[in-house]
Image (tube, rainbow, N blue to C red):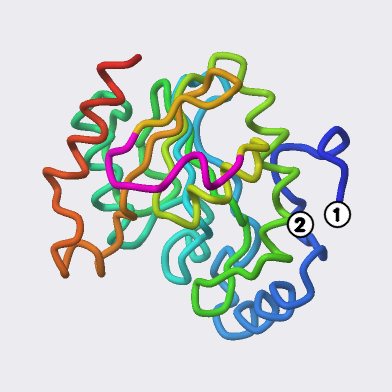
Amino acid sequence: MPDAATVGYGPPPDCDLCPRLVDFRRKNQETWPDWHNGPVPSFGSLDARLLIVGLAPGLKGANRTGRPFTGDYAGDLLYQTLTRFDFATGTYDKRPDDDLQLHDCRIANGVRCLPPENKPIGFEVRNCRPFLVAEIEAMKNLRIILALGGIAHNTLLSTLGERRASFKFAHSAFHTLGNGLILADSYHCSRYNTNTGRLTEEMFEDVFRNIRSLL
């Protein structure tokens, strides 16, 4: 595992830390040679007060386009909501060269490469953790981190050195951590969660309404 003090804010395009992810990346490069198929860099300014963290890139979303939550349904709902609460302006057109801009907000993933079946294993989460650590340390204005989903919540707690048992995941929960940061929780904005009714647009907006009131 690399030392957090010596890494940048994301792995290089040819990162080889996780053999399983490297093998999957190469297979996808053969199948879809025009796709991004590599570690996905974060989107937004390091000066932001809000950091949104997902688990990993989606196959036909960020893995295809090279920008977090861009090109799939999760991005449709996320960027629509960010725009509604003035965290984004411009037009989200499901591609990285649209004119969408984030304001006071940055988006990252706990694991930067696409995992098979969208499920990274513990070894891969740990390998990618120093990049997230370095990124958080570089965000000097950071006040709130929003975890999209329970796994992202647990990843963040481990990243920040907090005990998971002390901060239980629950939709729209807000936890004040030992370092003074606020960890906010939301169910992931996936099509599965919205189709099953686990997450509605109103529920998702409530989380951002609370975040906006705290900033």
Disc 1 packing (10 Å; few <14; some 14–19; many ≥20): few
Residue at 73% across, 66% down? 123
Magenta region: which residues? 163-173
Whole-number angstrom distance, CA of label 1 to CA of label 2: 5 Å
Q: Which mark is residue 209?
A: none
Residue at 50% across, 79% down? 117
Q: Is residue 8 left or right of residue 80?
A: right
| Closer to the camera in the image, 113 or 208 | 208
Q: Secondary structure at mark 2?
A: helix
Is residue 101 shown above or below 191? above
Is residue 64 shown above or below 136? below
Q: Is residue 73 left or right of residue 153?
A: left
Say which residue label 2 marks: 127
Say which residue label 1 marks: 1
Q: Is residue 152 left or right of residue 170?
A: right
Examine the image and state in which quarter residue 121 appears: bottom right
| Image quadrant containing the C terminus | top left
